[in-house]
Amino acid sequence: MDVTPTGEVRIVDYKTGRAPPPEYAADALFQLKFYALVLWRLRGAVPRTLRLVYLGSGDVLTHELTENDLRAVERELLVLWEAIGRATRTGDWPPTPNRLCDWCPHRALCPAWGGTPPPYPLPVAD
């Protein structure tokens, strides 16, 4: 987090790798939007700029933020939190396979790859 000479707050994250393709830019910004939401809720001021600096490629991804952006992130997080609560109560944690699965060391335990997960450690509500 840094503050401009005019007093506006920016959230900057330095990444050691290369910038993702443009179609993944929104996913890359989610972490910074989460930080911005926390700052907004704690301090009452919306950070105006989010910036990802990719040291591996020299690219800089900048996003100007609005209060509406943060309200949308908050709604998304509430939906995610409800899903986590539901999965915790039922013990049903469905996998969501994607291209990163090719590098995952836990495929033997993943139902998406025919694996058997370990027993669920919490009591399940009926």
Image (cartoon, grey):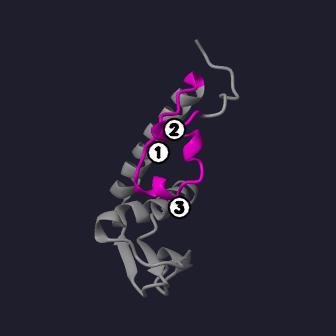
Q: Position of residue 19 (x, y in %)?
A: 40, 76
Instruction: Say above or below: 33 vs 95.
Output: below
What is the spatial separation of the Cα atoms under label 2 and label 1, in whole angstroms?
6 Å
Q: Residue at x 53, y 78 (%)?
A: 14
Circle 1: residue type: Leu
Q: Is residue 48 magenta?
A: no
Identify which residue, 93 or 48, lies in the foreground: 93
Identify which residue, 66 or 51, lies in the foreground: 51
**Residue corresponding to mark 1:** 77
Identify which residue, 6 or 13, lies in the foreground: 13
**Magenta stretch bounds:** 89-116
Give the crowd class for mark 2: few <14, some 14-19, many >=20 residues within 10 Å: few
> For numbered disc 2, what is the local secondary structure?
helix
Q: Position of residue 54 (x, y in %)?
A: 46, 80
**Residue corresponding to mark 3:** 35
> For numbered disc 1, what is the local secondary structure?
helix
What quarter of the picture does the C terminus occupy? top right
**Residue corresponding to mark 2:** 81
Q: Residue at x 45, y 75 (%)?
A: 52
User: Which residue extends farthest left?
Assistant: 23
Instruction: Say above or below: 81 vs 51.
Output: above
Q: Residue at x 51, y 76 (%)?
A: 12
